[in-house]
Image (cartoon, helix red, strand yellow):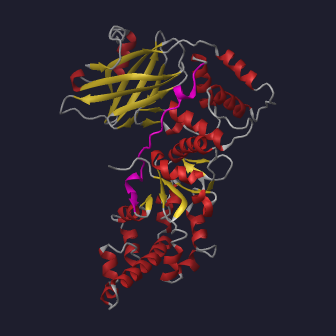
Amino acid sequence: MVGCENADDGQNSQKDKNSPQATQELSQQEKTPKQDYAVRYFEPKIYGCDWAIVSFSVDVLNAGAKIPDAYDVKITAENDDANTHEKAQIVGDKGYAVFEDLSEASTYTISVSGLIDDKEIALEEAYTFSTPQRTLTLDQIDQFIFDELNTYNINEENQMLLETQACLSLLGLESGRYGVLEPITQANICRFEYSVNTLDDFVNYDNILGVPNKRALDAMKDILSLDMTMRNVDIIKEFKPAAYELSRYATIDNQGGKLNIEQYILDLIVDNHAMMQIYKKHPFDVDTKTFKSLYADEYKKDIPQEALDFRLLQIAAKNKAQFSKDAEDFLLIIARPGQRLTTLAGSDNELTVNALIAYSYLLIDAYRDTNTQLATSTTYRDYEFQWQLYSQKKGKSVASGRNASWHYDRQKLSYVPGFSNHQYGVAIDFFERETFFETALYTYLKKHGEKYGFYNYYSEPWHWVYLGALPE
């Protein structure tokens, strides 16, 4: 059983099951009755002539049949025994796989296998599609690029960058100064990579580097070879903020937006005996039973409620720093980016690739609206660097010895190592910190930031965090 969207049923025939090749394939796999599974293929998204994202879903029809643990996607060229395999990435109830290096004007067949209890199960249904014919050869595209760059000295070191910038220009995208990897150049490279690696809610982050690279350059040339009149509005997809591993800890309140790392850590240590022992010594959440029990005497003091609340917050602030110091080995493991870090052009600052994508769209749109480019002061900070900031370069031992009042005041300016949103690679401090709120860029961010998944921590107008798609 198979359901194909936008499929030509007359063309989508399977291989002859009695052929030697088919017999050999079935002998290597466990054949599963068709009635157990139904594979639905969706129209592949083809970029240019040689880059495609294929997608499918598998329905389990028999209540007794197991749901596959993973899927393998095979793509076969017509009249070609060579098969290309890709592991499908699963998003919701759909599987996606990206295939590169296809041939123009060629027919391909997609088939899916499931992995169940370490056995490969052929799901049998297949889907056929064809790639388009180029209107220009790749050699002709190279000539267009050469004509664009004929006044520049091209050498081995700058060729990739210059060719990428020429392609961006031919596609109607801002390319920046030729020969210089500027933020605006990086942003458009990233937007292009995001666009050709995205389908529905699927994003192939592995293919998004945000720097000049052969894969992206080849994809640009391929698209131009299909249609030289192609422009950015035909290629660049609208950005859609996506949830990531910490999005469920996003907090939006009267202080603005941030990741609630305190709750994230509490959730992780609840079943960790060693970390819970440290927390019981240094509880930092005033609402937990552990905190209330340890400081029961504080609640008995005859002082106004407002003064009591303030005193408890001071104690919690110092405990948070003490927990960070004593739980260092644990925090070095969990207080880190969940995705690959990428360096921002023109700086040493880094963002996770998902935050970089959002920032790239924000940078270009803000630039077009204000004619000014965003510039980052601080982004990712690791655990040790955060301690240097927090301790004012005096070391964690000195800082942990300070009184509760010092820690409370300090945490208004520099957050506790392990708890800072910066350590997760999704927070940005913009230039100029103290005057950023007076700029047109700040006004643009206040009005449009949430469209890109960025939220401000109100007490610091320069501090913005990529929270992605928020839970409903």
Q: Give the answer, above or below, for where 383 lies relative to 349.
A: below
Residue 207 percent location from the top left of the image: 54, 35
Q: Of residues 114 and 90, which is closer to you in this image?
A: 90
The verdict on residue 231 being magenta is yes
Residue 328 percent location from the top left of the image: 50, 68
- Residue 268 left/right relative to 425: left
- Residue 215 left/right relative to 8: right
- Residue 139 left/right relative to 317: right
Residue 382 percent location from the top left of the image: 57, 60
Where's the N terminus, which quadrant?
Answer: top left
Q: Give the answer, above or below, for where 254 lies relative to 232.
A: below
Q: Quadrant of residue 5?
A: top left
Q: Residue furthest left?
A: 63
What residue sits 41% from the left and 80% below the top? 310
Q: Give the answer, above or below, for where 343 lies relative to 287.
A: above
Q: Does the rendering let one see residue 205?
A: yes
Residue 24 percent location from the top left of the image: 38, 16
Q: Of residues 111 and 5, which is closer to you in this image?
A: 5
The verdict on residue 209 being magenta is no
What residue sits 58% from the left and 39% below the top? 209
Range drawn in magenta: 229-253
How many numbered tags mark residues here? 0
What residue sits 35% from the left and 14% below the top? 23
